[in-house]
Image (spheres, grey):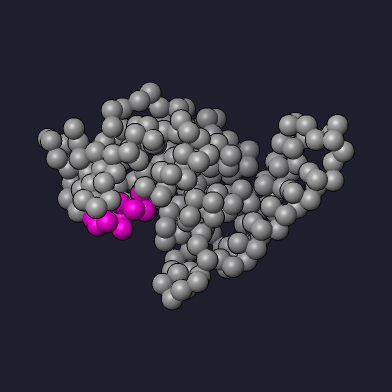
Amino acid sequence: MTVLHLADEGEAADLAAFLSRLLHYDRGAAVRLQAAGTALAVFGRPPSFEVLAIRAVRLAKPYEDGLTVTLDVTVSAGELLEAVDESAATAAVPAAVTGPPWAGVLPPRGGWRPERGLPAPDALRATVGAAVGEFRRRTEELAPQSRTRAELDRTGREIWSRTVGDTALPVRAVHAAQSLGFLRAASDAENTGNAENLALLSSGAWLRLRTPYGSIAVRRAGAGLGIPPLSVR
């Protein structure tokens, strides 16, 4: 069995927290793992947000049991969570599963360039809060007979598809970042200093909201997941 040696207990705890949040939205969630050298990328797709979430994890050393070059496998998020040993800072890689369609379609590894117009972290959090409040208000105002799943979905799509600031980034991507623990409040000196590492990047049809704790990637409007041209790896 392949065992990943994480850089420290903090990396193990952050990985476990990320997996737990994914499982909150999908109990049968799968994640794709890609690793080379001492870097591990964990990809997941919480269905509520229709985005790709990427958590980067630092490794203390490459791998055990003969895997010495790269790792690329899709596994159960629940099984991986159970295999994380925070005190030992290790994670045993579970058996591979048949990945969902999104697992074969990942953002490009390179070619990212900065995009202008991203609001400050506090403004991003305020935007999400306002959107959540609007959704609740509008759904509560609906007559009981009109409060159907189709109407709720329509209202949600309208609100979460709006763009942020002067960018093409949809509000749902920021909501996903906050819900998955990537967009944390600047309640201490460390988080205040990390605010400058928040950035919006683009590569082809992809947009990526990068934070110190993880990234959210999304296709631009009109270029949904699963529609060519895509980078399939």
Left or right position of 226 against 76: right
Query: Closest to the observer: 73 or 149?
Result: 149
Can residue 208 be seen from the camera position used here? Answer: no
Q: Which residue lies furthest to the bottom in this view?
A: 189
Left or right position of 202 against 90: right
Image coordinates of residue 27 in percent, x first then y, are: 48, 33
Q: Quadrant of residue 100?
A: top left
Give the residue at x 73% y 31%. Answer: 149
Image coordinates of residue 191 in percent, x first then y, are: 45, 69
Can residue 92 be seen from the camera position used here? Answer: yes
Which of the image's four quarters has the N terminus?
top left
Q: Residue furthest left?
A: 66
Query: Closest to the observer: 231 or 125?
Result: 125
Give the residue at x 39% y 36%. Answer: 77
Does residue 204 show up magenta in the picture? no
Image coordinates of residue 220 in percent, x first then y, are: 58, 44
Query: Closest to the observer: 183 or 233?
Result: 183
Residue bounds of the magenta highlight: 7-15
Q: Is the magenta stretch mostly helix, strand or loop?
A: helix
Q: Residue furthest top?
A: 98
Give the residue at x 31% y 55%. Answer: 11
Give the residue at x 36% y 47%. Answer: 16
Query: Closest to the observer: 12 or 153?
Result: 12
Residue 162's place in the image compared with 114, above or below, is above
Does residue 8 show up magenta in the picture? yes
Q: In which quarter of the image is residue 64?
A: top left
Which of the image's four quarters has the C terminus?
top left
Q: In which quarter of the image is residue 44?
A: top left
Image coordinates of residue 90 in percent, x first then y, are: 23, 47
